[in-house]
């Protein structure tokens, strides 16, 4: 009971600290990634990149595959902003983090169990190697904290609020960040669909925030 009370106290402090950090954080710089919400949507994909190539980059710099993918995303957003005549500021993103223990079955009620990490992408850095190292340093600092668990608790609290609370939270989070970036591991075994083996998956990379 004492240990449980201590863990609850630590989590409560983490939730409060995370909420205050988000609340008092400056707005993300205004870029073309922040637009008024409308009906027009768009999607684009990169050319396929071999997973072994990305892993080799990670090994060469002593970083994780996720670090490499985030650095690639930062480089792509930098080129996108420069191509449209905008200054490539560092921009904040939210990254979903799975909190369900490995091997734990999904309950009959379904539902996700994830928290969010507030992360600054080093878009301002022109050198690709510097971006990789900067991403790694920033993710290492985040791993030492309890931000994902704290935001999971925050999302649970927000989910219990009336509709106006949902809108207020969405507006606040949208103003403090420019995108949600996530990666989802692909199947480790061959997958069949309608009698044919699936040889390639198409997935999204970043969902950008919009101002309402």
Image (spheres, rainbow, N blue to C red):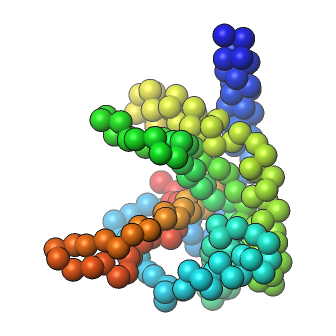
- Which of the pair 45/108 is nearer the observer? 108
Is residue 124 visible from the viewing direction of this image?
Answer: no
Q: Position of residue 208 (x, y in %)?
A: 52, 64
Which image quadrant for residue 127? bottom right
Q: Position of residue 172 (x, y in %)?
A: 59, 45
User: Which quadrant is home to the N terminus?
Assistant: top right
Q: Is residue 194 left or right of residue 162?
A: left
Count of marks, rendered view: 0
Is residue 60 visible from the viewing direction of this image?
Answer: yes
Q: Is residue 59 above or below residue 136?
A: below
Residue occupying image coordinates x 54% and y 62%: 182
Q: Is residue 191 left or right of residue 173?
A: left
- Which of the pair 52/27 is nearer the observer? 52
Q: Position of residue 142 (x, y in %)?
A: 75, 50
Q: Is residue 200 left or right of residue 96?
A: left
Q: Is residue 145 above or below residue 9?
A: below
Residue occupying image coordinates x 63% and y 80%: 54
Q: Is residue 26 left or right of residue 173?
A: right
Q: Is residue 82 above or below residue 173?
A: below
- Which of the pair 39/76 is nearer the observer? 76
Q: Is residue 102 above or below residue 191?
A: above
Residue at far left of view = 194
Which image quadrant for residue 49? bottom right
Which image quadrant for residue 50? bottom right
Residue occupying image coordinates x 76% and y 69%: 63
Residue occupying image coordinates x 21% and y 80%: 196
- Which of the pair 118/174 is nearer the observer? 118
Q: Position of residue 136 (x, y in %)?
A: 78, 65
């Amino acid at each position: 009971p004492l240990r449980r009370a201590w863990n609850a106290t630590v989590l409560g402090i983490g939730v409060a600290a995370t909420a205050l950090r988000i609340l008092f954080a400056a707005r993300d710089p205004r870029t073309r990634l922040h637009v008024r919400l409308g009906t027009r949507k768009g999607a684009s994909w990169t050319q396929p990149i071999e997973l072994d190539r990305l892993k080799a980059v990670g090994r060469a710099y002593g970083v994780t595959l996720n670090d490499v993918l985030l650095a690639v995303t930062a480089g792509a957003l930098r080129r996108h902003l420069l191509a449209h005549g905008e200054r490539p500021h560092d921009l904040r993103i939210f990254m979903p983090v799975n909190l369900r223990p490995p091997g734990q079955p999904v309950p009959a009620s379904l539902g996700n169990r994830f928290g969010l990490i507030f992360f600054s992408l080093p878009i301002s850095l022109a050198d690709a190697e510097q971006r990789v190292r900067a991403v790694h340093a920033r993710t290492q600092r985040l791993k030492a904290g309890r931000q994902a668990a704290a935001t999971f608790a925050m999302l649970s609290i927000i989910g219990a609020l009336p509709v106006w609370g949902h809108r207020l939270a969405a507006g606040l989070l949208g103003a403090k960040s420019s995108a949600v970036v996530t990666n989802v591991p692909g199947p480790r075994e061959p997958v069949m669909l309608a009698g044919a083996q699936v040889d390639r998956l198409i997935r999204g990379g970043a969902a950008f925030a919009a101002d309402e």
